[in-house]
Amino acid sequence: MPLDRLFSPLALGPAELPNRIVSTAHQTTLVHEHLPTDDFVAYHEARARGGAGLIVLEATAVHPSGLLTSHTLGGYLPQIVDGYRRVAAAVGPHGTRLFVQLLHGGREQIATPPRAPALAPSPVPSPRFRAEPRSASPAEIEELVAGYARCAELAAEAELAGVEVSAAHRYLIEQFLDPDLNLRDDEWRDGSRFLVEVLRAVRSAAPGLALGVRLSADSPRARTIAELAVAEGADYVSLALGDSSTYLGSVGIVPPPPVPEAAVLELLFEAGVPRIATSRMLDVELADRLVGEGRVEALGMTRALIADPELPRKAREGRLAERIGCVGCNACIAHYHAGTPLRCAVNPRTGREARLGPPAADRRRRLVVVGGGPAGIAAAIEAGSAGHEVVLAERQDRLGGQIALTRAAPGGRELAERFLDNAERGLAAAGVDVRLGTEGPEGLEADAFVLATGAKPYRGDEGLTAWDVLSGTIPDGERVLVADWGGDPAGLDAAEVLAAAGKRVTLAVASVGVGELVHQYRRNLYLQRLYRAGVRIVHHHELASGPSLRNVFAPELETPVEADAVVLALGRVPVEAEPPPGARVERAGDCLSPRSLEEAVLEGTLAARRAVA
Ligand SMILES: Cc1cc2nc3c(=O)[nH]c(=O)nc-3n(C[C@H](O)[C@H](O)[C@H](O)COP(=O)(O)O)c2cc1C
């Protein structure tokens, strides 16, 4: 059998996993009143059915003061037992083990107002989420420890197989251990005491359950935490990356490309107990090799499973060609930060397991999809997989639309390649007749059409655009101004490409922040690369006639543009196509109004279902 090492069982204390693929804790926002919803149950059931060996349920608050958001599970609520039981009943028959992660964020609070008062070892404001905690009193600290114990007791009552204590991401437990954040002068000054007391309390409240500790492998406190955990009898450690409190540190929590795949591997260390390592592990063959070489005992493959819950089963059955690969766009965590239910940009069924069934056909129809960008590709795959006859007509000589364009830039390259790889395999498996260099819809016969003709740059006929740069046009002259509206990544990509071509680049951004439509972890890495490439960033300025740069807050402040060339990145407008008279027509994606990959794929999928219904 392929991948035997990855698919060998692993004991984490009393819990025996059927294989080494783990869905590590991740907040789904499929939570209501701090309890699991039916969508939550369906979501995890799908990952269990797909073959994950272990599911660790998301960060669950041990106390009301530790609710990271208004949709965090409340592990201290008596009703959580019923919620856990429903998940366990759905997951258990597939052989998957079910743990829960217990967490208190301390001074890290993601919630929007009204926020609970933040508690921390000491009153040190947190820069990323701008929480300003007070120092927890000794009585409050005792109450928090008791909260961990109560939560463990409830997890045991629901017969979960394990409890994972998060000492990662510089949340509360790490805050006690951090001398910059623990400025106390009482007995809790010894930061290890809090972790030790928590682990003892959890163990004694749930003695029959596996006990794990999650930590950030890139933290200066990683080894101390692992040593304390093992000394207290932890059955495993889970090695993640990242620090919630800083812009750059937070990127590691859910690292997007171009962070290399499996970045955590460089930080692994012997712990004396099994290790679960997590960070952009996408390739099951690599995972199998790592287990075989003894470098790690199990792999978190969380986004890989968010994108394709069936990945383990497909891998085991030699059907990897059918996988939907995670592209690293971070739409999943963007939903969490926006407080909306978990979604995946490349798999519209994620988070909708209970509502959006598999592709189906009552009778075979002929569908023509016009436009080979993400919306058109999704439409063609959906209808083709259902057994319909599908033609995908693309005007250009390549598929992928805007995604393919971003292949030219470091921030888009891997995403584009992974997306196109999915597309190629998906279209082939669905039997779609792909016609490049074909204008549509005229001259194409069909029962129904999906028009997915995409977008073009706003004011694209007024000069050189970011898309031109990404298509290979580098302007003459040394000094280039990129006039960026501050939304989608096109301007950022163009600035990087121009800087790499040796230009002196100024990026003028007409918004409060840079790339406001780009998820913050990707945006932070854009900023890191742009600064390192010497790109000068001018905030809050829009391009005015002259040309000049006009301050968007104080419009009387204008400065003439001093550049040899100007590149426009001013947003996009739809490209519309004339529908064939009398035909059944559905539209999807940017031709309805330009948005992101996620809407394109979702709307393409739904449009195809409507068109052939
Ligand atoms: C939507 C989302 C929510 C997350 N929430 C948690 C969490 O509750 N607790 C935690 O320890 N890690 C959390 N993480 C981090 C993941 O457990 C994992 O470490 C991270 O996604 C990197 O692994 P991957 O590349 O396999 O996805 C979250 C990740 C995502 C995508």
Image (spheres, rainbow, N blue to C red):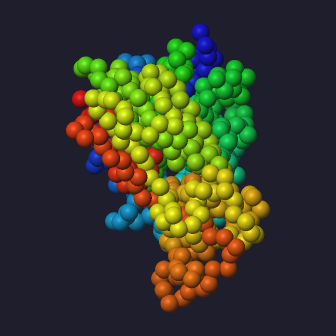
Q: Residue 180 lies in what quarter of the image?
A: bottom right
Task: Name the side, left or right, on which 115 lies relative to 581.
Answer: right
Q: Residue 565 lies in what quarter of the image?
A: bottom right
- Compared to residue 120, the image places residue 209 above or below, namely above
**Which residue shows up at 52% across the image and 26% down it?**
425
* Quadrant of the drawing holding the C terminus: top left
The answer to which of 58 and 594 lies nearer the viewer is: 594
Which residue is farthest front? 443
**Which residue shows up at 29% across the image and 23% down it?**
365
Question: Residue 102: horizontal and vertical position, in percent?
Answer: 46, 43
* Residue 161 seen from this side: no
Which residue is farthest left? 582
The answer to which of 476 and 244 lies nearer the viewer is: 476
The answer to which of 140 and 94 lies nearer the viewer is: 94
The answer to which of 381 and 531 lies nearer the viewer is: 381
**Which residue shows up at 72% across the image and 41% down it?**
267
Question: Residue 3: horizontal and vertical position, in percent?
Answer: 61, 16
**Which residue shows up at 38% across the image and 26% down it?**
390
Task: Name the side, left or right, on which 360 lies relative to 395.
Answer: left
Task: Name the side, left or right, on which 518 lies relative to 563.
Answer: left
Question: Residue 327: horizontal and vertical position, in percent?
Answer: 54, 39
Which residue is farthest top? 1
Number of numbered labels in the structure image: 0
Question: Residue 447: horizontal and vertical position, in percent?
Answer: 27, 29
* Quadrant of the drawing holding the N terminus: top right
* Residue 396 seen from this side: yes
